Image: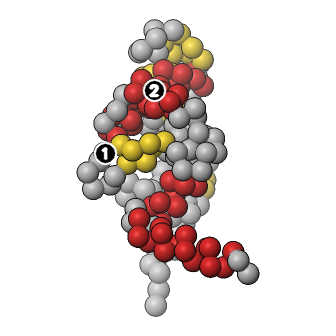
Amino acid sequence: MGRGPRITEQPCDWCGEMFKPRRRKDHDGKPVRFCSQPCHWASYGVEGRTEKSCSRCKIVQPIDNFTLDPTTSDGHKANCKTCAIPGQRDYDLRRNYGITHAEYDVMYGQQGGLCAICGEPAAPLHGKHAPIDHNHTTGQVREILCGSCNTGIGYFMEDPEVLESAARYLRKWSAT
């Protein structure tokens, strides 16, 4: 069984250098036209620009302080990375848990930054916030947990009887 016609070398639309694409189409289903990521970004007019003004803080900053975004005319997001992160955190907390960042801070402070189950530090994951335990059926926010306890509850399907059965099992085998 054949895999279709062979991919042949073609010129890059930006630099003109001959290259052999690894695949016929990109992730959008369009034919591959560039030999490299730098040539692809250069086609968006990103090359040569060194500064940009953040739409939130209005400070002119180096272009490297802005996340790349091929959907915009200059190839970078409108907000600098410093302004984008807090806004994204607030949006995530409101969308996923129905709480504000201030409410999260109060919860975290009341728990002393510790997991409600094991008492270990509830460290932020992926630069966002510590895991927030919530009922997946009702959406009710419970407490802040560490990553291990939050994952464990998920694996035990949030079922207290399954968790109690697991505890009995561990007690049975810890005596030996």
Q: Quadrant of the C terminus?
A: bottom right
Crowding near the residue tagged with mark 2, few <14, some 14–19, many ≥20 C-alpha atoms within 10 Å: few
Residue drawn 44% across and 42% down?
Answer: 143
Pick whichever, 90 or 171, lies toward us: 171
- Which mark, residue 140? 1
Answer above or below: position of 154 versus 120: below
Answer above or below: position of 169 versus 140: below
Pick whichever, 148 or 54, lies toward us: 148
**Mark positioned earlier in the residue sequence (2 or 1):** 2
How far across and how far down the image is residue 160, in percent? Answer: 41, 65
Identify the image quadrant of residue 61: top right
Q: Amino acid at mark 2?
A: Val
Identify the image quadrant of residue 39: top right
Pick whichever, 98 or 168, lies toward us: 168
- Which mark, residue 45? none
Q: Amino acid at mark 1?
A: Gln
Residue 134 in sight? yes
Farthest residue in the left direction? 138
Residue drawn 58% across and 23% down?
Answer: 65
Farthest residue in the bottom direction? 1
Residue drawn 70% across and 77% down?
Answer: 175
Q: Which residue is mark 2?
A: 106
Farthest residue in the top direction? 59
Marks 2,1: beta carbons within 8 A: no
Crowding near the residue tagged with mark 1, few <14, some 14–19, many ≥20 C-alpha atoms within 10 Å: few
How far across and how far down the image is residue 149, in percent? Answer: 54, 55
Answer above or below: position of 158 versus 6: above
How far across and how far down the image is residue 122, in percent? Answer: 58, 41
Alpha carbons under labels 2 and 1: distance apart: 17 Å
Colour option used: secondary structure
How far across and how far down the image is residue 78, in percent? Answer: 42, 23
